[in-house]
Image (tube, coloured by chain):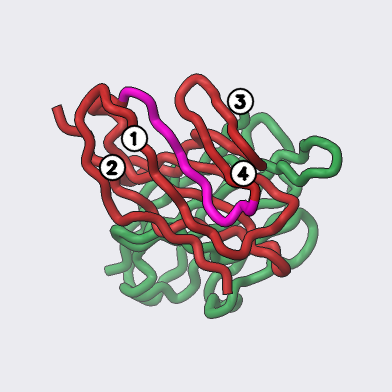
Chain colours: A red, B green
């Protein structure tokens, strides 16, 4: 049974780099891993998507090791507005069902 | 970018009544739409996958007769919660898939709607 787990919560100060890791032990080998940000009572907002190694866009970086059993979202220099819940999303191996991670509640402090 | 809307954004209904939630892809055609449910302080849980023109595929534990899904066009899917009860109160979120991707890798991205808050009294 595929499990996708994340740390429940993290605190950080403004301007710091934050790394959130998602462990996904049984995901499809031919699909992307995607990370989302969610604010209260809103739908998830796309942050970044990757297949392997490292991907970087204007807001984040995503590191995926060769075994793809985990992925790490890196947010450089967080601000107060980055306080939100962050989720990874991947498809399970075999059934190809989309499964969200357990979510990480990031709180950015001034 | 691809935009997905949901209507209504919030709804309150009485126990025993039915409520319909619409999910629309505004600027792209979605061959597949997904319906998720999210309880407070929990992750999103996939309820069903809806393919245009065919019956939806429900996840284990989701009653298909209670959560009716219709995907009649490439831009619209509806979720009807029938005979709603207080335990159905939740945040319902849809997503739509834009058919694009690199060769050899499945890279379909899900575009999420803003969600619908359902409260059953």
Which region of the structure is painted magenta? A67-77
**Image quadrant occupied by the N terminus of chain B:** top right
Q: Are marks 2 and 1 in contact (CB under 8 Å)?
A: yes
Say what secondary structure mark 2 lies in.
Answer: strand
Same chain assignment for discs 3 and 1: no
Q: Residue at x 78, y 63 (%)?
A: B54
Same-subunit check for callouts 3 and 2: no
Q: Quadrant of residue B35?
A: bottom right
Which chain letter matches label 1? A
How many residues crowd mark 1 within 10 Å: few (<14), some (14–19), many (20+)?
many
How crowded pointer 4 is (Cα within 10 Å; few <14, some 14-19, many 20+) is rated as many
Marker disc for residue A18: 1
Above or below, A27 against A57 in this view is: below
| Label 4: chain letter | B
Task: State left or right for residue A51 relative to residue B93.
Answer: right
Which chain does tag 2 point to?
A: A
The image shows residue B121 at horizontal and vertical percentages of 27, 69
Q: Is residue B74 visible?
A: no
Q: Is residue B64 left or right of residue B89?
A: right
Discs 4/1, front: 1
Which is more N-terminal, label 1 or label 2?
1
A73 inside magenta stretch: yes
Residue picked out by circle 4:
B110
Residue annotated with mark 3:
B1
Q: Residue at x 48, y 63 (%)?
A: B45
């Amino acid at each position: 049974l595929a499990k996708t787990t994340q740390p429940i919560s993290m605190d950080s100060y403004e301007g710091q780099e934050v790394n959130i890791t998602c462990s996904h032990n049984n995901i499809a080998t031919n699909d992307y891993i995607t990370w989302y940000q969610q604010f209260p009572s809103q739908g998830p907002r796309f942050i970044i998507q990757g297949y392997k190694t490292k991907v970087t866009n204007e807001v984040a970086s995503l590191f995926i090791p060769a075994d793809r059993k985990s992925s790490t979202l890196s947010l450089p220099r967080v601000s107060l507005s980055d306080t939100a819940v962050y989720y990874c999303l991947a498809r399970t191996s075999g059934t190809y069902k989309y499964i969200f991670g357990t979510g990480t509640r990031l709180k950015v402090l001034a | 970018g691809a935009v997905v809307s949901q209507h209504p954004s919030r709804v309150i209904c009485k126990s025993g009544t039915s409520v319909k939630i619409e999910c629309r892809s505004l600027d792209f055609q979605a061959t597949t739409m997904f319906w998720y449910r999210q309880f407070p302080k929990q992750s999103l849980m996939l309820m069903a996958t809806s393919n245009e023109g065919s019956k939806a595929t429900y996840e284990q534990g989701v009653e298909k007769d209670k959560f009716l899904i219709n995907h009649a066009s490439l831009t619209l899917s509806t979720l009807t919660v029938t005979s709603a009860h207080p335990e159905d109160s939740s945040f319902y979120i849809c997503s739509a898939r834009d058919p694009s991707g690199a060769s050899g890798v499945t890279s379909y991205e899900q575009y999420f709607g803003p969600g619908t808050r359902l409260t059953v009294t």
